[in-house]
Amino acid sequence: MNQIDSRALRKTLGAFTTGVTVITTLDAGGKAYGVTANSFNSVSLDPPLILWSQSLTSSSYPAFRDCDRFVVNILADHQIHVSNQFAKSGDDKFRGIGVTPGLGGVPIIDGCAAHLECEKIAAYPGGDHVVYLGRVERMERAARRPLAFGDGRYMVTFAHDLGELAGANGSTAGLPALEAVRLAGAALPEVCEQIGQRTVGLAVWGNLGPTIVRWEPSAAPVSPHLQTGVVVSLTQSATGLAFAAFMRPDIVQDAIDRELATRGLAEQADPDGLAAKLAEARQHGIARAVGAGPSVRHKVTVNAFSAPVFDANGEMVLSLSTTSPAERLGADWDGAVPVALRRAAEQLSNRLGYRGGDCRQGAQGQ
């Protein structure tokens, strides 16, 4: 039998995203113990049974081995600090943490998404862990979103099930823009990784034009001046060019004309070579802005790319953009970053129900 590398196994298991719990108990002397665990699962509804596992080397193992009761505190998404505090060794894990005594005096952590008060009814050996089986005796669910954990990092949860928004065949046609933004926002960390840990911006069409509504920062942000709520140029920024190229002309054309008039370019046949820029964007399925000088906002010369995201109706609903100093982001249409960004936008379009192929096919259908 081939030997399994423990680090590779941990990384593989990280693909299974879980909730985060803190299990609490009291020892025979009444001292409180707690440990962070995501190895929690349901077992049976009748009788109501759950399980969780603990490392045999945990400093709190003797307390849980000998206890009669424990509480499963399912953490809410604002309780990352609670998870981190109980994941560390030390005698002051409950410092600054509000608790309420439960059955048998076992502490219940305040502010959780839910908790289950359990009687421990069995313990089973499991390699370097022990698996505890508990019978649920009392429980409570709060109106808070649970904290999630996967791939070695904390995550936020959101409803992927579209419910009444989906048609009889599961179609997401007509998916409201707010739902699309919520889904895209949750995907930004993944997109950031896909394009090589670069800053990613999410933009939508607002009442004044293309508007940045969220940034996913990277370890090396383009500048400290990234802001949300910024309306960007339709004719000079990569984000704006994406909307100008891929959104329906009856939506964007008036805004383009107003911007050109403001810049005093309305009478020119092809101001700034705009027609060529839009044609190139449609050809490549992604818009590009190549910096010719220091950006007013970022104070450095930048290159930027922006890829359109389509909904189930084939309408552009938002864009994914990335920008970096020119020396860190080449202008090649087929560079690793724009190719990865376009692929990420296509994947997100598919999640929104778009079935028109890649972004270039979507553009041709406008």
Image (spheres, rainbow, N blue to C red):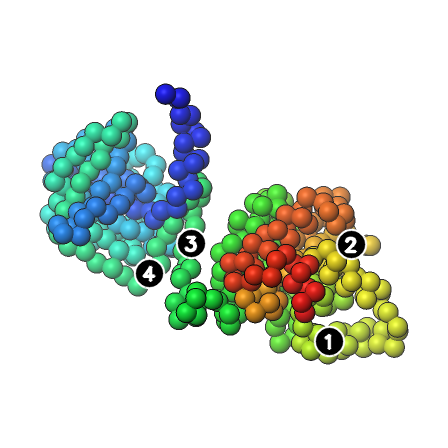
Task: Check residue 290 in the rendering and tell me which mark sits there, or answer none.
Answer: 2
Q: Residue at x 57, y 48 (%)?
A: 192
Residue 84 relative to residue 175: left or right = left
> Are there few (<14), some (14-19), or many (20+) residues within 10 Å of tag 1?
some
Return the disc, 3 or 2, that comes first in the chain's sequence.
3
Considering only vertical position in the picture, is 178 above or below 35? below
Quadrant in the picture for residue 356 = bottom right
The one of 263 and 159 positioned closer to us in this rendering: 159
Tell me, yes or no, whether the two marked residues, 1 and 2, touch with CB atoms within 8 Å: no
Looking at the rendered structure, the kind of residue marked 1 is: Gln
Q: Say which residue appears at 21% left-offset and 46% top-offset.
A: 43
The answer to whether residue 286 is visible is yes
The residue that disc 4 covers is 144
Residue at x-position 30% and y-position 63%:
143
Callouts 4 and 1 close, C-beta under 8 Å: no
| Amino acid type assigned to the residue bearing label 4 in the image | Arg
| Helix, strand or loop at mark 3 | strand
Q: Please tell me whether mark 2 sits on a helix, a strand or a loop.
A: strand
Residue wearing tag 3: 156
